[in-house]
Image (cartoon, rainbow, N blue to C red):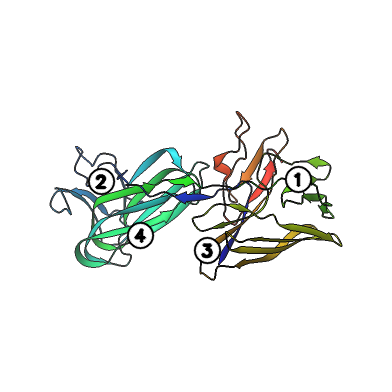
Amino acid sequence: MMRPALLLILPAWLCAPAAAQNLAANPSFEDGADAPNGWNFNHRGSDGEIAWDDTRAASGDRSVRLTNAEGQTGNVLRTVRLDPPLPPGSRVTYGGMSAAEDVAGSAPSIIVYLMSTAGARQTVVAKGLPGTHDFAEVRATSVCERETSSIVIYLCHYGTGTAWWDDAVVQVERAEPTVIRPRPAASRDLAALATDDGLSLTLNDAGGVSRVLVGDADITATDLPSGLWVQPWGGDVIPVAGTLEQAAGDIAQTWEDAEAGLRVSTEWAVEGGVITCRGALEDLTGEDRAVDVIASLPVGGDDELWLWGADINHAVPLRSPDDGSPSPQALDDLTFSSLARSGD
């Protein structure tokens, strides 16, 4: 019913339908002199043949042909630059027409790299058919996990035999931001939840996080959303407020929204060096539906540069170095997340 996520800034995106154009220039390999314009032949260290073929095509007069008796022929690739980048949640459709003759082992396939603005790579694949057959469509659609600045499409043949590719396509449906409803105004803070190693969170009676301390350092960014939120699929991002009651150091939070048809019950607690939030989300409509649960911390509030770790290899600035505004590159709802001052 729901997918938990840990966010620093709320990246709620809803894909807007639009007529999508093919961003892969020269998709049918018709233009060029000695090779099709805009496409590169990548042998991957093999002795296989990659050729521009004017004897067989799905449309027009030409295609590309890949042949190797030993396998690992290689691929034909091009890069599509995106300006402005695609927001997270955007859809990318990729495909082409593939024919085969005596193909065995690995079937012809399309591999696509969705490259983020931070340099992280999301890999997606569409598989064709082996054997011997005329041109058949190979197509798939994937959703961008991060802000995406370029798309690399590889038309591959890593098996034995001969494969042809024609009529490549790269289409995008750009996501649009959905509505983030404001959290009700708070009237008071509750007692802080503090770990034994110096982390402290202060919740207010509206369900927001008023203060974040690490030791004596106040790292609160008051201009960022905070606390718990829910987002029904395709709907607004709704703040979880309700009633917060503190007893024996723990905080019990209950919230219900009749319009959204949702009820949330959670308990905030300290367990040694960890602050936990455990609870349940209940549907009140009686319908099967997807709901995201979002926990947002307002961290990165001092004058130093903070870095958001999108994964274990890539980190991006939390804020723009120019004006201090939240960076769209740091919007992420994947399972890995970290935050640190630059240089720490």
The crowding category of the residue bearing disc 3, from other C-alpha atoms within 10 Å (few below 14, some 14 to 19, many at least 20), is some
Judging by the rendered image, the residue that carries numbered circle 3 is: 290
Give the foreground label among 2 and 1.
1
Q: Is residue 236 left or right of residue 163?
A: right
- Spot occupied by residue 240 in the image (x, y as percentages of width and height): 66, 55
The crowding category of the residue bearing disc 2, from other C-alpha atoms within 10 Å (few below 14, some 14 to 19, many at least 20), is many
Q: Secondary structure at mark 3?
A: loop
Give the foreground label among 4 and 1.
1
Examine the rendered structure and indicate whether residue 262 appears above or below residue 148: below
Judging by the rendered image, the residue that carries numbered circle 4 is: 126
Judging by the rendered image, the residue that carries numbered circle 1 is: 210
**Amino acid, disc 4:** Ala
- What's the CA distance linking mark 2 and mark 1? 53 Å
- What's the CA distance linking mark 3 and mark 2? 37 Å
**Amino acid, disc 2:** Pro
N-terminal of the pair, mark 2 or mark 1, is: 2
Q: Is residue 55 left or right of residue 43?
A: left
Q: Is residue 79 left or right of residue 36?
A: right
- What's the CA distance linking mark 4 and mark 3? 26 Å
- What's the CA distance linking mark 1 and mark 3? 29 Å
Give the foreground label among 4 and 3.
3
| Residue name at image x 61 percent, y 63 percent | 262
**Amino acid, disc 1:** Ser
N-terminal of the pair, mark 4 or mark 3, is: 4
Judging by the rendered image, the residue that carries numbered circle 2 is: 27
**Amino acid, disc 3:** Ala
The crowding category of the residue bearing disc 4, from other C-alpha atoms within 10 Å (few below 14, some 14 to 19, many at least 20), is some
N-terminal of the pair, mark 4 or mark 2, is: 2
N-terminal of the pair, mark 1 or mark 3, is: 1
- What's the CA distance linking mark 4 and mark 2? 17 Å
